[in-house]
Amino acid sequence: MAAPSAAQRAPSAQALLDVWASDWRRAARTVASIEADERLTRSLDGRRGRLVIETESDIRFDRAGGAVRDVRRLRVNGRQRDPADRRVRDRFERAFGPAGREIAAPPLLPGLAFADAEAVGIAADRLGDTAAWRVSIRVGDRLDRMTAWFSQGAVPRLLRMRTEGDRPRGGRYARTVAYDRIGGLDLAVSTETETTIRQRRRLRSYAVVLTASGAYRDIRIVSR
């Protein structure tokens, strides 16, 4: 791939994704786990008002993509609560099932998110002052639409990824993840997620909006 240029001809979408994936695998060979400080704010806007759950956690991603959270601090509508009280922490999951779990889930490591991925389109774009390639991606038989932005250049870096799709009964889901290169790997530094679900109570149908904003700091790569 040639040097970045506003008029640069787009490479093959699949070739770009393959170059990025090869670079990821090479950098990840000696990685045992990835650890970070996570700050996550989840909010609910529904018929009974607004609920805000804030957590500060240590989070650990293993090579297989699993993530374990150790919650250090918990606030509910601004009030401190016991971080060990899973009844409070899991309120979204209990109340909203898959939608609550989905919005609370940490971002997948991109090397795993792109497993079995097929790049189906590419176009020049910009993220702020950075020239980028916007790539449309299909993963297996998933119906969600995935778009990734990579830096232009010989060694593409993943800058942003957006996943969006429909959910049951007219609901919607969208998540945008921003990345930074750390230790040769493109790792999530922030997430913005929103899902809309429709619920029915006593013959009345109404929309509930769930949002989550996550930040990842002090990211550490642990070698094998």
Image (cartoon, rainbow, N blue to C red):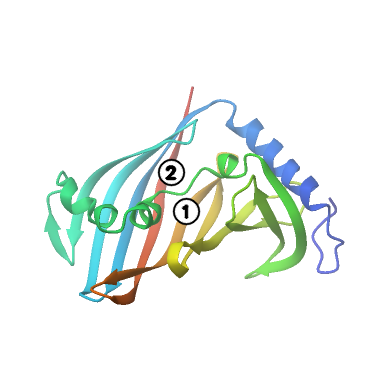
Q: Which residue lies furthest to the top in this view?
A: 224
Q: Which residue is labeled 2 in the image?
A: 219
Q: In this view, does 49 lie to the left or right of 38?
A: left
Q: Which residue is drawn at 85% across and 68% down?
A: 7
Whole-number angstrom distance, CA of label 2 to CA of label 1 = 9 Å
Q: Position of residue 32 (x, y in %)?
A: 48, 27
Q: Which residue is drawn at 42% across and 65% down?
A: 195
Q: Position of residue 8 (x, y in %)?
A: 85, 63
Q: Which residue is labeled 1 in the image?
A: 189
Instruction: Choose top left, top right, bottom left or bottom right for residue 70.
Output: top left
Position of 196 relative to 69 (above/below): below
Q: Is mark 1 on a helix, strand or loop?
A: strand
Pointer 1 local density, CA inside 10 Å: few below 14, some 14–19, many at least 20? some
Pointer 2 local density, CA inside 10 Å: few below 14, some 14–19, many at least 20? some
Mark seen at residue 79 = none
Q: In this view, does 89 lie to the left or right of 194?
A: left
Instruction: Choose top left, top right, bottom left or bottom right for residue 171.
Output: bottom left
Look at label 2 and name its amino acid: Ile
Q: Which of 115 and 25 is in front in this view?
A: 115
Position of 23 relative to 14 (above/below): above
Q: Which of 28 and 167 is in front in this view?
A: 167
Look at label 1 and name its amino acid: Val
Q: Residue at x 41, y 48 (%)?
A: 106
Q: How many marks?
A: 2
Q: Which of marks 2 and 1 is nearer the N terminus?
A: 1
Q: Is mark 2 on a helix, strand or loop?
A: strand
Q: Position of residue 61 (x, y in %)?
A: 43, 37
Q: Nearer the viewer, residue 125 or 86?
A: 86
Cβ atoms under marks 2 and 1 closer than 8 Å = yes
Q: Which of 5 and 29 is in front in this view?
A: 29
